[in-house]
Image (spheres, grey):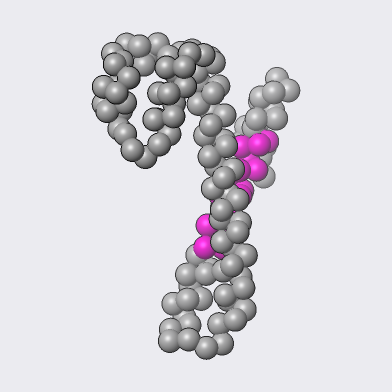
């Protein structure tokens, strides 16, 4: 994979640029980007980066879930404990969902590496 492809992936996964800006920044025509989308190495690297990003998000939410649980335990005083309680529960639920998706992604990757494919109904 070329350095240019790596740089484009960096920009694709950043929040700083949309598709048109990325094409302008890297002087790409739409056909080049479309060709890269059929390049197995490009797609594999993109998918690897997406999995890593999900992993980082899951780790961050796992840490937040711990803090939220501590806050819930200590919610004996405060101006509006019901609002705080609901926010903490939302963080915990979101963390669980992200972790579940991360585990599903890991299972899918293991299946892909072993040459077998799992359906979504097999993961659970």
In the rendered image, the residue lying farthest to the right is 114
Q: Position of residue 61 (x, y in %)?
A: 56, 55
Q: Is residue 111 magenta?
A: no
Q: Magenta residues, as a range?
A: 91-107
Does the image show residue 79?
A: yes
Q: Residue at x 56, y 61 (%)?
A: 64
Q: Position of residue 53 (x, y in %)?
A: 53, 39
Depth check: give the residue in front, 50 or 6.
6
Q: Position of residue 37 (x, y in %)?
A: 43, 17
Does the image show residue 93?
A: no
Q: Residue at x 26, y 26 (%)?
A: 20
Quarter-wise, where is residue 73 in the image?
bottom right
Q: Residue at x 65, y 30 (%)?
A: 109
Depth check: give the residue in front, 110 or 62.
62
Above/below status of 18 relative to 77 = above
Q: In which quadrant of the rendered image does the C terminus lie?
A: top right
**Number of numbered labels in the structure image:** 0
Q: Position of residue 89 (x, y in %)?
A: 53, 68
In the displayed structure, does residue 79 sit left or right of residue 109? left
Quarter-wise, where is residue 17 in the image?
top left
Above/below status of 95 relative to 40 = below
Q: Residue at x 29, y 16 (%)?
A: 27
In the displayed structure, does residue 75 sit left or right of residue 123? left
User: Magenta stretch mostly in which secondary structure?
Assistant: helix
């Amino acid at each position: 994979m070329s350095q240019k492809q790596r740089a484009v992936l960096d920009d694709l996964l950043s929040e700083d640029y949309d598709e048109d800006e990325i094409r302008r920044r890297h002087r790409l025509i739409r056909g080049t980007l479309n060709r890269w989308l059929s390049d197995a190495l490009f797609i594999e690297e993109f998918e690897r980066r997406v999995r890593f990003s999900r992993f980082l998000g899951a780790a961050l939410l796992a840490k937040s879930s711990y803090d939220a649980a501590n806050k819930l335990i200590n919610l004996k005083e405060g101006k509006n404990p019901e609002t705080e309680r609901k926010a903490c529960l939302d963080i915990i639920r979101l963390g669980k969902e992200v972790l579940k998706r991360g585990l599903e992604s890991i299972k899918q990757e293991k299946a892909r590496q072993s040459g077998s494919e799992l359906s979504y109904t097999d993961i659970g």
